[in-house]
Structures are given as C-alpha cells and as structure tokens.
Image (cartoon, coloured by chain):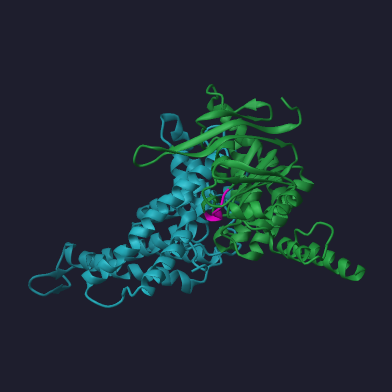
Chain colours: A green, B cyan
Amino acid sequence: MNSDSYIKIENLSISYEEDDGGRTSVLKNISLNIKKGEYLAVLGHNGSGKSTLAKLLNMILEPDSGKIYIDGKEITDPSMTEEDVFELRKKVGMVFQNPDNQLVATIVEDDVAFGPENLGIEPHEIRKRVDDALSAVGMSEYAKGEPARLSGGQKQRIAIAGILAMKPDCMIFDESTAMLDPLGRRDIMDTIEMLNREHGITIIMITHYMDEAARANRIVVLDDGEILMDGAPTQIFEQHEKLKECGLDVPQCVGLVNLLKERGIIIKGECHTPSACADAIVAALNKG
Amino acid sequence: MKSITLGQYYSVDSPIHRLDPRVKIVLAILYIVIVFLSANILSMALLLGSAFLLIALAHIPVKLVMKSVKPIVFIIAFTAIINIFWTSGEGDPLIDIGFAQIYKEGIVNAIFLVIRIFVLIIGSSILLTYTTTPISLTDGIERLLSPLKKIGLPVHDFAMIMTIALRFIPTLMEEADKIMSAQKARGADFTNGSLIQRAKALIPILIPLFSSSIRHALDLATAMECRCYRGGEGRTRMKILKCGTADIVAVVLVVAFGAAVVCLNVFFA
C-alpha cells in the first residue's frame, strides 16, 4: 500500500434499491487515493454520487463491494466494531449542508464542546480546545451567544469549530456552502483553506460550484457514479468541452480566458479566481 | 422572529443568577415547602417580605414579575372565592345570604391562600426560570438526578432530549413562519372564517412542519453520530458545576428562613 496515501479507495461500488425492486448504482467501481494534507474537491452535478462517496468515508453508509482504507485501517472490514467506528469518526470529521441540523446546544461554546465531550476528554482540555477552535474560525466573540441568532455562514463556522475541536486528521465538507449566501460561502471557503494550510488537515470538499473547486489542489470530477477526471484545477479546466458534457461549466474567469484564447489573446498564469484572473489580464495588456 | 427568548430568563448579573443551578433547584423545592408550612399572619408577612427580597436580590424589575403573575390572577381569584364560600367556621357567619354563608375563617383562609400562591409563583420563578437559562436548568436536573442512573433510569437521555427540544424551538418557529408565508402567497386565509375553518386552515402548515421536523431529526442524528455521540457513557463535560461559598450561604439563609417561619407558627399560634 502506498505509504503516503491517507485515504485509499479500491473498486468501490454502491447501489440503492428502487421502489420497484430494481437497483440503481450510485458509485461504480471507484478507486481513489488521497494523500495526507491534500485539499481535494469532488465535483459533480446532482446525482453524480458525490455525497454518497462522502458518506461512505465516514461509515454513514456501507458499500456493496470494494474497500476503503483510512490511515492504513480498512474501514469496510465486516469485523469493524462500534469502537472502531468511534475511532474512525474521531479522525474523519464531517460538516453537512444545513448548519441548523448540526448544532446540538443552545449556546455556541457548549455546541463546540459537544464533540470533545463525547470523546471523554478532560474538562480543562475541552475548554482549551473550544477556545482554540472558536478563535480559529473567528467566532470567539460569539462564544456565549445563541446559535439561533447567527447568520447561516456563522452557524456553519460554529459547526466547523465543533469538528475542529475534536482534532481530526481529515474533514469532509458535504456541500457545506450550498445553503449560504455569497458572503457566507466566501467565509467558509476561507476557513476551509485556513484549516488545510495552518492546521494541516486533509480536506475533502464535495461541491457543485466550480469556483469553489478551483481553490483546491486537486479536483476529482464524478459523473454518473464514475470518476471522469482527476487532476489539478488547471488541468481540469483545460478540458472545458468534457466538463460541459457532464453538465458542469468552468469558472467564469476561466471561461473568459478561454474565450480570449480563441480570439488569439493568450493569457498566462493561473486564472481560477477573479482577482488572479484580473491580474493576469492586466499583465497581458501591459505586455501587449 | 429572531428575537424570541426562551422561557422567562432575564439576563442580568445578580447573586441569584450566579448560584449553582443544582442548588437553585433544591432551594426552590425547599422554598415551596416553607410556603406551605407558614400558617399565621406573621409568617405570611415574612413570606411576602421574602418574595420581594428575592426579586430585589435577583435585580429583576418588579413590574416584569407582576406581569408574569397576571395570567394566573383569575385562578387565584377563583380559588379565593371558593375558599370564602366553602370554609365553615365556628360561631356566627359574617354574612348570610340564604344559600351561602361567609365565615371569618373563610376570609382568612382565602387571604392566606392568595398570599401562598402569589409567593409560590414569585419564589420559584425568581429562583429558577428568571435567573437560570433553560440549558443550565436541564443541566442541573440531569446532575441532580444522576444517582437515578444506577437504577437504570435514562437521565442523560432525557436531558439530551430536553436540550435538543430547546435548541430547535427557534428553528421550527422560523420554519412555521416560512411555511405560513408560502401558504399565504398561495391564497390561504388564516384569519377569517369560523373557528373550525381556521383550525382547518392550519393543517397545511402543520403537515409540512411535521415532515420537516422529522427531516431535521434524521439529519441531526447523523451529525451527532459523526461527532462521536453514543449516549452518556464515557462522556465528560466541559463545564463543571461547583458549589461555592455563595451557594452555601444561600442554603443557610433559606434554611434559617424556614426555621423562622416554623418558629412564628409555633410561638404565635
């Protein structure tokens, strides 16, 4: 087994039963390696199986066939005990779509403490972890507040802090920005990037927003339960025809650069974010 | 919608607010017992005095407390009237209107009862709901009842259910509001018509609300499992409740107050 891969997925398949008794496969024979400290975006349109993949990694769902290794341990082993599942969830945290459905307590800091409390950590250590996690997501001033009074983006940051306080190796974001406004989305994206960069947490981000995927180190495109593309954002966005075929579009700024290229204006450098794109265009204009 | 506050909690800093919730629950029970122990005019006066002392100690505006007593004025008045007419005493009735007689004892009983209920409500709400957040109240109850875990009562689970219920009240209210607006936009009318018609108009709100709360519950259960929740076993708590000097002083004061009431009963019977 590859020593530096943190998550290793081998020939994973899962299907669900239809009302008429037939089976629809959601993931078809997927194999994937994810390195420790990687920032991976899993991209796909609705029904591509991307959320199912996330749920498999955290043992919320079990596959029909195939194996998943996390940190060298096979989690699809039928002899997994409840204790093993507990250990797994300690390592791999998950942030879901609806922030309201993840918060347990009526006070922000109590909610962040929920995970560490479940782990049976000493009270003073929990206190420290809660304070650290809240300051990491920039929500320290709301520690004594009520989640009900916060905005969607703020609630989602509390949910992230709740996972962060458990000190996981890896965090999965299952469309965690889908219910947020643009400002909230940007906040969460910045937080995710910070977690990856400053805390060295392996990030798996499930999304259907191109511009969010563009910020990752690596993109895996899922289409109809299969891996269609796998590579760095630049490599993925070069194949915009292929992306279009599976109902995805390149980020607007990448689209602009591609259009310019068709007209013979070559813009160099990475243009995944609007500001980087603007800089690149200015540089090209100055040169020309 | 966002400004709703749960229960009556009044957020200020006061000696009573700072007491340990467990101590407050015990004291509230003790206080209720004392209220029913008092039996003569002097101890009644002492009771009334203690109620106002509590309000002052908790830094809660008297107006606010009186407002919360208002809804039960009717019940108090009703019990008082029943007492006036149904208590028969020795000697001649004060007023005799044929089918009913009013005795001196009846009036005294009624006054005592009114004072008792009044003080009961104020005392327990000052000690508990006004000065303790619902969450620390649940916490206090869980910890007080935790010895019952030994005989197999799921104390932790009940406390968790309470906490989550409290947590979801604002969420569900927001949702009910949204559903109502959506139904109104489709021409639903909640304000006109007979009572039955209006009740019927609520069905299109209740059903979506019900199904969405089930969805919330499923999602929350998954999220809780992902956060390693597996019941009360092996769980620690961040906040440790500690009984400080203030708590001991409070217990001593309430016990002394109880003793004073008993003394007044005995020596001035």
Residue at the far left in the pictured view: B98
User: Would residue A104 appear left or right of A161 to someone viewing this image?
Assistant: left
Q: Which image quadrant is residue A170 in? A: top right
Q: Position of residue B16 (x, y in %)?
A: 56, 58
* Vertical relation: A118 (above or below) A135: above
Q: Residue at x 32, y 66 (%)?
A: B114
- Magenta-drawn stretch, dominant element (helix, strand or loop): loop
Taking depth in this image into account, of A143 and A68 the one nearest to the observer is A68
The reply to whether the magenta stretch includes residue A98 is yes
Q: Position of residue B183 (x, y in %)?
A: 36, 70
Residue at the far top in the pictured view: A79
* Vertical relation: B182 (above or below) B37: below
- Residue range (magenta): A96-100
Q: Residue at x 59, y 64 (%)?
A: B12
User: Would residue B44 appear left or right of B235 to someone viewing this image?
Assistant: left
Taking depth in this image into account, of A260 and A53 the one nearest to the observer is A260
